[in-house]
Amino acid sequence: MIKNDLFLRALKGETVDRPPVWMMRQAGRYLPEFMELREKYDFFTRCRTPELASEITVQPIRRYGMDAAILFSDILVVPQAMNVEVEMKPNFGPYLPNPIRDRKTLDQVIVPDVQQELGYVMDAIKMTKEKLNDEIPLIGFAGSPWTILCYMVQGQGSKNFDKAKEFCFTQPTLAHELLQKITDTTIVYLKAKVAAGVNAVQVFDSWGGMLSPIDYQEFSWQYINQIIEALKDDAPVIAFGKGCWFALGEMAKSNASALGVDWTCSARNARYLSGGNITLQGNFDPSRLLSPPAEIKKMVNQMINEFGKDKYIVNLGHGILPNIPLENAQAFVEAVKEYKSDR
């Protein structure tokens, strides 16, 4: 049994003394101990070496004592497993030299044997579980099919993913075939993660907000929902769509255990749009961690009061930035742990 199960209880909607707290991208680039490892090993070596991935996962827990750990990995290990080459270029980001843009390139994309291709992730989970020693839950994650398609088709990061959208709107049959392959792979991958020991999973739809509400339903949400339906009996699923406030009503009808909210949607609107019954997670602006610690604590308190302490998980509205001072991240976590409800 997990000793601190606050995060899992919040996912079930139980009454708690205070909400749980963790931070997206908490395992990583703002920590000096992470930077030391980054000097020695390149990005995908860190992802593929279970000893390194598990060590990076627990670094922020040792330092700050969050209520959940999230496995250090990357959403782009999935396309790699699907026979799509992915490089991580310094000062550039992900680069896919052979983007998927026609029938020929699509036919080379496979639904892999995840144990064979991504077994290193399962090994990292087992090692991390040993290190965590059932103190707190471990979260596994994947990118949404739409977000993975964005990289597969665009070939790199983008401000508007114009080539990905062009592919979907001019070759919808191929787009849906690719989305289904990604969905099938993601389901098997997340199920394997749960079997290896993660206690909950999160689907990151980082680029969902690029789509109009109608296109979101067609090219993103229906595939995320397939994942939720496939996983709902295995583990709690958190669905996080950045910029997807317009879909909160639809998302709340699903079997997701919680919905992530970014900082552009107020607590009040998020509760209203999601119908007020589902657990919400978020939504502190990551850049606000540059404010003085005293101000951060005040803002976190206000945020909890606005969301309410129950059916709520304190988090950022997106991943933590690399330039956040250590004491500011600490102030964020401490504010939640010290929270006293005045209601």
Image: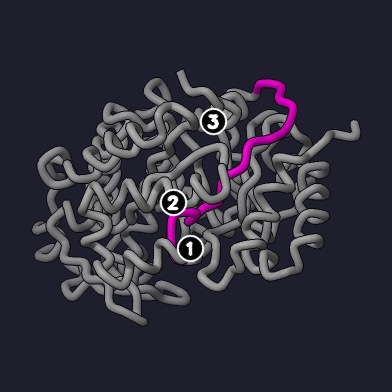
Residue found 51% across the figure and 70% down from its top: 322
Res. 167 image quadrant:
bottom left
Q: Disc 1 and disc 2: Cα gap in Å?
A: 8 Å
Q: Residues within 10 Å of mark 3 (few under 14, many from 20)?
A: many
Q: Position of residue 99 (x, y in %)?
A: 21, 71
In-image side of 50 versus 148 (left or right): left
Rate crowding at label 2 as few (under 14), some (14 to 19) or many (20 or more) other CA atoms within 10 Å. Answer: some
Residue 94 visible within the image? yes
- The residue pinned by badge 3 equals 257
Q: Secondary structure at mark 2?
A: helix
Residue sitting nearer the eye, 237 or 2: 2
Does the magenta segment cover residue 22?
Answer: yes
Cα separation, mark 3 vs mark 2, equals 27 Å
Calculate the distance from the C-alpha at mark 1 to the C-alpha at mark 3: 30 Å
Q: Are marks 1 and 2 in contact (CB under 8 Å)?
A: yes
From the image, tell me which residue sits under label 1.
31
Q: Is residue 130 above or below residue 249?
A: above
Q: Which residue is found at the position 50% from the left and 54% from the top?
A: 26
Q: Going from the N terminus, do you reach mark 1 or mark 2 first?
A: 1
Q: Which residue is mark 2?
A: 59
Mark 3 or 2 closer to N-term?
A: 2
